[in-house]
Image (cartoon, coloured by chain):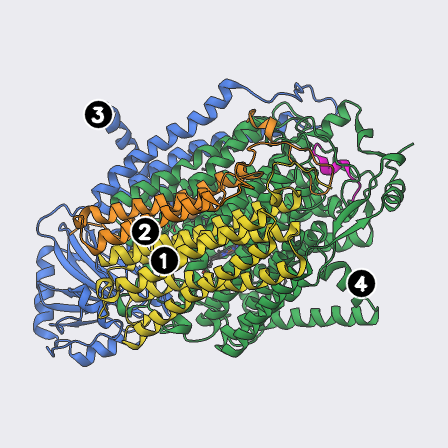
Amino acid sequence: MSMREWITHLIKLLFPPQVLLPDIVGIDIGLTVGAIAIMVYLTVRHRWGWLWREWLTTVDHKKIGIMYLIAALVMLFRGGVDALMIRTQLIGPRAHFMGAQQYDEVFTTHGTVMIFFMAMPMVFALFNAAVPLMIGARDVAFPRLNAISFWIFAFGAILLNISFSIGGSPSAGWMSYPPYSELAYNPGVGENYFLLSLQVAGIGTIATGINFLVTVLRMRAPGMSLSKMPIFAWSALITSSLVLFAFPPLTVALGLTMLDRLFGASFFTVAHQGMPMMYVNLFWIFGHPEVYILIMPAFGIFSEVVPVFSRKALFGYEAMVGSLLAISFLSYGVWVHHFFEMGAGPGVNVFFGLSTMLIAIPTGVKMFNWLFTMWGGRIRLTVPMLWQLAFIPTFVVGGATGVMLAAVPADYQYHNSYFMIAHFHNVIVGGTVFGVLSGMYYWWPKMFGWKLNQRQATWAFAFFVAGFWVTFMPQYFLGLEGMTRRMATYPAGLGWTSLNWWSTMGSYLMAVGFLIMVYNIIWSRLHPDWDTTGDPWDGRTLEWSLPSPAPEYNFARIPHVRSRDEWWAMKREGRTDDVKISADSVQPIHVPRNSAMPIMLAAAFFVGSIGMVFSWFWMAILGGLGVVAALAYGSFADYSELTIDAAHVLKTEAAMGRVDS
Amino acid sequence: MSTTTADRPPEFQDMHESIRIMGFWIFLSTDVGLFSSLFAVYAVFRSRVALGPTPHQLFAMGPVLTETLILLTSSFTCSLSLYSARMNRLRGAVAWLIVTLLLGASFVTLEIREFVADVTAGHGWSHSAFLSGFFTLVGTHGSHVTIGIVWAVMLALQLAMKGLTVTNRRKLYTFALYWHFLDIVWIFLFSVVYLSGMA
Amino acid sequence: MDGEEQIDTAPTGHGDEVEVGFLAPRIHAAPFPGMQITGYVLSMALTLAAFGLVAYHWLPLSSLVTVILVLAFIQAALQLGIFMHLREARGTAWHLPVLALALFVGLGIVGFSIWIMLFKSGVS
Amino acid sequence: MASGRQRLMKGLGLAVVGLSIAGCGSDYVVLHPAGPVAQSELHLIVLSTVIVGVVILLVWVLWAYVLLRFRDIPGNQAPYLPNWRHHRVLEILVFALPVVALIAIGIPTVRKTYALDHVPSHHPLVIDVTSLDYKWVFEYPRQHIATVNYFYMPVGRPVLFQLTANSPLTAFWVPNLGGMEYAMPNRVLPLWLEATRHGVFLGRNSNFNGIDFWRMTFEAHAVSELDFHAWVHRIQVTKPPMTHRDWRRLLHRSVTAPAAFSGYPANTFPERATQFTVKGLHYIPTREP
Ligand code: HEA
Ligand code: HEA
Ligand code: CUA
Ligand SMILES: [Cu+2]
């Protein structure tokens, strides 16, 4: 037996058909057990009150950011386990770790969880953690709405995740094309779960989009004109504007499918002249901007990380901003490249193929500008920078294969094949995931006050990146060998075996990387390396002028911004004392008061959604009334603020050594 | 705590409130996206009538005209409510608001009656893609109006309870934006759906 | 990006606010709601015109729909300008571009969808 | 100009040959075209690969160089330019480079997209294809025969496939012969392919439609014109016609073995798409054969 066969054999021994492999239900049981354990802990330690006051009702963007981060990491684990199950099933021909039905459920959840419940919240975590601080604001524009967004997202995620134990899981793929997703072919409640969880989470996402758009436009510190704004704030602004117009078409696509399924409408059914392709059209009007929603924040993060760890100003700031704008603008006009095969005719295909290719231009400008930023710098190989350095050579491959996909007749051969799977993991993992991980390591000290152990983090990085290449490069070739996506298994003799085997091994390497990352976090928490300076990386933007973590009110004194990279300039010009306050100039500070309304509102949404999923309409109505009640309560209670008095501010700042004497 | 400039509408004098108004505008623009998608669906499905009625057979001029006139008038009374508030006439503001919501309610009632008539005539939305698109587009607008009515009721109560506070002025202002926006959607509805269908 | 330096010293949420008056408000405290009445009359006229065109077949079918749409856009602009105080006060500078973008995207969605769904593939 | 392009095409041709001989085994169906459509698509694939390959290489080299030269290590002699933010020429260059590359990919993309939209023949062989849940039905309207999960086509003659579905959205893909096209309910979409060499080519549904999706394959047999007619004749003589019952059985969600029929009920293939759509999914033929 060759080594390869031997390993395959071993894995098959470890996981006999449909027995041992952690079933999705198993994951749910694990999550439930974990939740119960946490609850027991809270009860024993009498921490419920603390949890409620400090976290569940908080409207502080910093805490909301942390909650987003935790949720995103849990979902990364969940989507990652799905990925491992996919890859294990595909390790060799005719493998039967799962049945076809289960396989369909697994890839559907994998895609849905990763896109909507891992990548999006990860991005929002970093927006929340960093954007208000770097623009010199005390909070986002609508703090309570921010909490509503989070809780709505969280309950949406729960909704999708419980489907596996309660009622049945969706299995029509992450884009859930009709008529397959219609009642005639998909009679269970799984598809309802899919539709409602995305619908609910989508509402929260739109609210976040509005919130950050207004925050960036209206809450900047005096003096920080748009042209002095950090690029990450720019990327938050532009991502938000994409959210605003990408999500409504999704809402419509999902909503109409729901009307078909629950109320007998005829939008995308086969009978009564329904038109399934209209769903596809609407879905991708959303779907394409969505992938840029995922990548723009990563671009923003890299534009912060590169200058800091090259000790050099960003090259071509204006071009960086301009290219973000250009990408977002173009991304509204390319969606047909996901269905060139629908027969819309050469005119349509050529138009959308060329518009797709155009995106390579602004993206290329960004790639080169990062390289030029490093040129003539002094590159420090810290963990955030390592992720950035891995990103460049990786993303350029994924982007370039994207351009190959955009060449219409060529796409006739790539579409729905593993070539396409390879493309998008290449950009999503190599772009978005590398990006948000870079950002996580970068802002971690600011969020938590302690640093992650760099050596462990480097090992995690090495495994993950090596695993990435081993996993996804073979998939390009699988595509050229005619392997299509979503195959529950495949026969031998088509030449797919060894490439698939390597791909599977790669995913195990990524898993090792992820486990080290988790270990890294736990270990570093137990042996904290406190960040006492507030500026562990020798940063350039305003968040590093604050202590880590920042006090509740962020800035005791709002800075007056004079230049781009203001904190860097302060350090160069010896103005760092500007951030200190003097005892006689302290003002009381207003901060928004905690509110139970957001979590109640989201819970009402959840109840209503469960009612819809099972067609228990009394429950749906109950949930709807709950939503109205929560909104009314919020409206009548009026928005309330808490005033932190000057003495308290002074004491807090003094404790951090930030008072001028 | 904000600077007050005398010649600025009261809704904007408080920085928080002015930011909220901007947020509301942004929300309205996402609603533009929502309705555009529904209009796109309707436009594509318009001729897909299967065995059901065509637009020409389904629509009648009378009821649409009535509904339109009612809604336009409510838009006008809504603007009078805001006008009164700016003149610091609380009574007027509340009164015009109530007139607005009554007009809105009669609009919704008429619309529901139309729908019920269609359905009892055997033209339920499951009979063709066109009917599905029609009911959903018009119904989405109608449910927006309904939400607006609930909102107006709460707003009237708050005005009565707390008077013309800065916050209430802002709420009235955003409500007015919402209401006029629905009017704009209706303008496109009767033009694209009804009038083009009857032409 | 330079022009905006003057108008863009935005406030912070809770801090000391820097006041910049741009786009000073036009309407308020007029003793008589003249604007509102004008707007109402105009919108009534436009609406009745559109209905009249259809009811009395005043125009050939080909141009009818176009004319109706033009009337609709005019009326929408009226609503925005007169009733929605589009140009009023602070923040205007931001919601205008966002609305413009919304219009652009909205028209794109409708127009492109119709084009795509024509299925112009023509091998046969 | 023309000769330059010829030379380029020749070079590309060589590259293709090189790839197919040395690069990889015969499993690379996309890289082993058996007809003009796949051939033309392969040209574009190779051309775009070469062009983006150059770009990738450029970025990698620059990346490696920067990384090696500008590390923050003691004694690094490389220049340190903390405020170097702009360079007119460079900025124009990085803008122009992708533009040039995209023009080079874009022009053949446009040409081929239009070219592939027309059957280069007035008398193509017509095959009506219906995808049912987990099987493919091929009907030859001129020859009045029908097959399931396999079909024959003559080498050297364009074939016009008229694709539709009586099932969820599927996609018809024979990588050796050319790229895919959707087969969807309520609509008939045309796709033309041609085989220029003999062989049996594996085709499959490439668009997920349920649990047995991965088993929904078929075989395309490319044979000489003579053999094709012999085959048709054999089917016409030896096989029974498809009955109403047979058709209903095909409509079940199942995977079936290949089969052939001499004749088929009228209207199994929705020539009149409108009629089909009104009745919807479970269309029942009005006439027995
Ligand atoms: C983060 C997410 C992300 C990003 C950033 C991209 C970026 C791009 N994508 Fe990708 N894509 C996806 C996520 C993403 N994609 C997903 C999830 C799918 C499939 C969904 C599904 O079906 O399930 C998909 C599918 C997909 C398709 C459909 C394939 C099919 O279904 O048949 C196409 C086709 O055109 C495409 C093209 C592109 C292009 C041209 C880019 C460009 O933006 C890339 C631009 C970047 C570069 C080009 C690199 C840097 C540039 C230079 C160095 C300059 C010079 C370069 C050249 C001239 C080449 N993508
Ligand atoms: C953000 C988006 C995202 C991300 C990050 C990933 C990450 C990964 N994806 Fe995914 N993928 C999608 C989005 C994403 N994917 C989408 C949208 C689809 C299409 C779905 C559809 O067709 O509908 C898809 C489909 C898809 C397929 C095709 C399935 C098919 O069509 O049949 C495959 C196959 O290899 C795959 C693999 C992987 C792998 C190996 C990773 C890895 O990078 C994962 C790395 C993470 C980990 C490895 C964490 C591991 C967990 C542990 C370490 C825990 C170990 C503990 C125990 C085992 C108890 N993905
Ligand atoms: Cu390449 Cu065979
Ligand atoms: Cu895309």
Q: Amino acid at mark 3?
A: Ala
Q: Which mark is residue D2?
A: 3
Q: Secondary structure at mark 4?
A: helix
Which residue, given by chain and number where applicable, does mark 1 sit on?
B69
Q: Chain of mark 2?
A: C
* Residue A655, percent from left and from top: 89, 43
Of all residues shown, which one is farthest toward the right? A661
The chain in orange = C
Q: Amino acid at mark 2?
A: Thr
> Image check: A304 left or right of A405?
right
Which residue, given by chain and number where applicable, does mark 4 sit on?
A50
Between marks 2 and 4 in the image, the one whose residue lies nearer the viewer? 2
Q: CB atoms at circles 3 and 1 under 8 Å apart?
A: no
For label 2, count other residues whose C-alpha is less than 10 Å away and answer few (under 14), some (14-19) or many (20+): many
Q: Amino acid at mark 4?
A: Trp
The residue lying toward the viewer, choosing from A597 and A490, is A597
User: What is the drawing colour of chain D?
Assistant: blue
Kindly tell me whether residue A175 is visible in this rendering: no
The residue lying toward the viewer, choosing from A623 and B91, is B91
Distance from the alpha carbon under mark 2 to that under mark 1 = 8 Å
Q: Bounds of the magenta span?
A: A540-549
| Predominant SS of the magenta segment | loop
